[in-house]
Amino acid sequence: MRRRDLIAASAALPVLAAGNHALAGDRPAPGGASISMPGVGLPVIAGGRLRNYVFVSLRLHLGGSATPESMRPKEAYLRDALVRAGHRTPFLVPDDWTRIDEAALSASLMRSAAAIAGRGSVVRIEIVNQAPRRRTGVQTG
């Protein structure tokens, strides 16, 4: 099996598990559905140079008419929009190359989600984990 297929399969597991609970009769509260986006690699660019990568795991809280099943095909587009935005205007935390700016990331992804999946489809973005490639990298001077 190709590495790409393994990654895609592992990304779909949380969504499939949520779908199985709904089939068993454990209906989630209206508007309480969410979808996970594990392991999005975002660059940390400072001074025009690539300084680090931070791998971010996200949880998108869905609103209104959006369901995990309807958002699953759009996840790749959301991931692509996030990586493109991270290269265009990096989500840089001043003086720290091991973290990204959570507010800037959330705002950018909310704008992209409104364009890709429709306004109100994603109501909140939760950053579950940030794992830098290099554990050091505090910018000095």
Image (cartoon, helix red, strand yellow):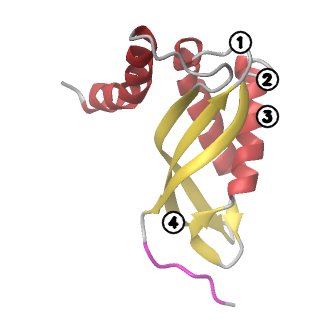
Whether tag 2 and tag 1 are in contact, CB under 8 A, the answer is yes
Residue closest to the far bottom: 141
Instruction: State the image quarter where residue 23 is shown.
Output: top left
Q: Secondary structure at mark 4?
A: strand
User: Is residue 138 magenta-colored?
Assistant: yes
Q: Determine the main secondary structure of the stretch shown in magenta.
A: loop
The C terminus - image quarter: bottom right
User: Is residue 34 magenta-colored?
Assistant: no
In front here: 23 or 106? 23
As measured in the structure, the alpha-carbon distance from the residue carrying label 2 to the one carrying label 1 is: 8 Å
Q: Would you name the residue on which mark 2 appears? A: 120
Q: Would you name the residue on which mark 3 appears? A: 111
The N terminus - image quarter: top left
The boundaries of the magenta stretch are 135-140
Estimate the x, y position of residue 60 in percent, counting from the top left. 61, 34
In front here: 86 or 10? 10
Q: Would you name the residue on which mark 4 appears? A: 52
As measured in the structure, the alpha-carbon distance from the residue carrying label 4 to the one carrying label 2 is: 33 Å
Residue shown at 59% from the left, 49% from the top: 127
As measured in the structure, the alpha-carbon distance from the residue carrying label 1 to the one carrying label 4 is: 38 Å
Q: What amino acid is at disc 4?
A: Asn
As measured in the structure, the alpha-carbon distance from the residue carrying label 4 to the one carrying label 3 is: 25 Å
Residue closest to the far front: 25
Residue shown at 66% from the left, 41% from the top: 125
Q: Secondary structure at mark 1?
A: loop
The mark found on residue 65 in the picture is: 1
Q: Is residue 85 something that shows in the picture?
A: yes
